[in-house]
Image (cartoon, rainbow, N blue to C red):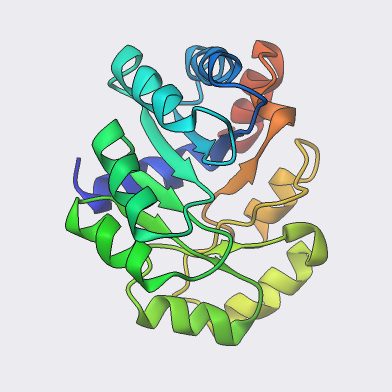
Amino acid sequence: MYRWQIMTRIAERRIVGIVRTADAGTAVRAALSTVDAGLDVVEVSMTTPGALDALAEIARSRPEAVIGAGTVLDEPTARLAALAGARFLVSPSLHRQVLSTGHRYGLAVLPGVATATEMVTALESGADAVKLFPARASSPDVLRDLLQALPQAPVVPTGGITVADAPAWIAAGAVACGIGSAITSGDTTTVQTLLSTLHP
């Protein structure tokens, strides 16, 4: 897939399921359950022990899904994630080497930002989208204000977003929302209900 196709899939689904668990086996099970429930855009946090092995297993098992690596902080991790089958990289902050490495391997890269200045810097550095993080420190109204000044910014709020408030973030202009255990806990009904809410 090309980077624009990866971003199109993220924008179409409007949700990125974030898997962060205590071990690789649990991460694989959570991710596969989420994909099988209908959400085929899933990020595996590199803070998960054995995350690269989990990512590779998920990518092999569900090649049609868009699997990403989260909490990518440096160039070596970016490269290893790409080789393991990641199609996008997410960071809590801006790391230019992660951007350049991800792009070298054809991956979309979403660095974390918290302010308008950081957002512009990330976009100027080549970010495919920006992760507004932590979203719990912001609000849909703040995002709406940011997008009045920066309507060209594709924003993916992440961190503290619940199933209940995801629609408000999308309505405020978010391209997609990152949601963790609330959506990747293996509850098929929750996944399907949220997807149907966001795609009436």
The residue sitting at 59% across, 17% down in the picture is 30
Numbered marks: total: 0
The residue sitting at 41% across, 50% down in the picture is 89
The image shows residue 105, relative to residue 30, as above or below, that is below
Q: Where is residue 11 in the image (x, y as percent from the top left)?
A: 44, 47
Q: Which of 43 and 83 is in front in this view?
A: 83
Q: Nearer the viewer, residue 113 or 155?
A: 113
Quarter-of-image position of residue 188: top right
Quarter of the picture containing the N terminus is top left
Horizontal side of residue 74 vs 156, given as left or right:
left
Quarter-of-image position of residue 110: bottom left
Q: Position of residue 155 (x, y in %)?
A: 54, 63
Quarter of the picture containing the C terminus is top right
Q: Position of residue 73 (x, y in %)?
A: 48, 58
Q: Where is residue 175 in the image (x, y as percent from the top left)?
A: 52, 55
The image shows residue 146, relative to residue 28, as above or below, that is below
The image shows residue 39, relative to residue 146, as above or below, that is above
Horizontal side of residue 131 vs 11, given as left or right:
right
The residue sitting at 25% across, 52% down in the picture is 3
Q: Which of 85 and 161 is in front in this view?
A: 85
Horizontal side of residue 52 vs 46, given as left or right:
left
